[in-house]
Each structure stands twice: as structure tokens, then as C-alpha cells.
Image (cartoon, grey):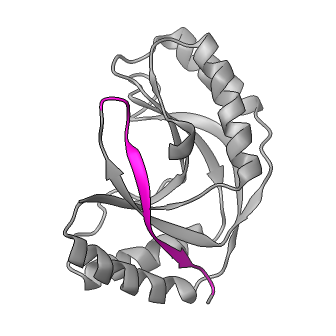
Amino acid sequence: MRAFLAVPLSSQAHDAVVDGMRELRRRLGAARWVRPEGIHITLRFLGEQDAGLLGRLGDAAAAGLTAQRPVEVTLGGGGFFPGPRRPRVAWLGGSAPGLERWVEAIEQAGAACGIDPEPRPFSLHVTLARLDRPWGAGDVETFLTVVGKWRLPPFVGREAVLFRSELAPSGAAYTPLRRLSVGG
């Protein structure tokens, strides 16, 4: 099954992102916007994996995350993958000092289970939209300006969630498989 590990947003931060996305939808060109229930901070995309391996990974990641500390998450600012000249994914950024240690613990758990390491460095982001056609310079600037003005309430991240991802024409549906507490 297709899976990933993520940090859920607090209800207040989540609601603020959903409200902000409504404005962006009205002001910007065509995009496939993330559904409200799909908003999260991705820690590690795992791709297609066997259910047994995901169980082992869950156990190993749970052990690694108990040694970590909760982190304060502050969301703000935005950007694009691969970049603003040819945007394919529009995202909300932020900071969470210590979150990189969660990612390291998850990478170590994955390596112990035989999962290849993620070749790209971790970049804290919340995917907001996927673009089938890159936006023009005006939409890129509007997105960056609007998201740059968002003032979202900080929150404390205390868990990672192992999600199953099922692709559908209406968008991906995410099912939590396991909640992994941080800090024992």
C-alpha cells in the first residue's frame, strides 16, 4: 500500500490554513487544491510498501520517536516545488526546531526495515495545491504575497501519524494506520 508519515496540524492552525486556501482559490489560476482532511506536514513519503513492512516500520519508528521531544511548529511563508519559475506544487512553509531529529529517527527506522533513504533533504512544508500547468508570474507573486501575510497560531507537535494514501480522481484519501507519540 502507498504510505507516508506526517505531523497533523492543530485544529486552530488547520482551520486557519483552510480559510486561507479559500482566498487563494478565488484569486489564483487552475490548481488541484488539497482537501481539508489532507492537510499535514509530511515527514517521510514511503511510496508503495508491503503491509508487514509498514507494521515493522511503525514499531521501529515508535521506538525512535519516544526518544525525541515535542516541537513547536510555526507555519508561515510559502514556496514552490521545484521552484517559482516552473511551479508544480504550491506549499506553506514554516519552522519547527527539533523536527529534523524526528525525521532522522524515522530514516533510521526505515533503514533498519530495508527502506532506501530519502535522497532529498527534509523541507518542512504543507502542500496546498498541485499544478497541472505551472502558474504565470502574476499568480506566483499573488500566492507568495498572500501566504506571506498569513499569521497562523503556533502549536506543539506531539505525534507523527503513519497514513495510508489511496489515489482517486477526486484526490488522495488518507487513512491513519498508526499514531506514534513523541517523548514517551
Please state, as top left, top right, bottom left or bottom right, where the N terminus lies in the image: bottom left
The residue drawn where x is 51% and y is 36% is 35
Pick the residue in front: 38 or 143: 38
- Image coords of residue 117 (percent x, y): 28, 69
Measured as percent of width and height from the top left, residue 137 is found at 51, 12
Residue at 59% of width from left, 83% of height from top?
A: 68
**Residue 115 appears in the picture as rendered:** no
Q: Which residues are magenta?
A: 169-183
Give the overall secondary structure of the magenta segment.
strand
Q: Quadrant of residue 76?
A: top right
| Image height of 10 relative to 105, above or below | above
Say whether residue 27 is visible.
yes
On screen, residue 113 versus residue 7, left or right, reads: left
In percent of width and height, residue 43 lies at 46, 61
Q: In terms of depth relative to the viewer, which is nearer, 10 or 136?
A: 10
Residue 31 x %, y %: 45, 20
- Quick one: 174 or 114, which is closer to the camera? 174
Question: Residue at horizontal 41%, vertical 75%?
Answer: 106
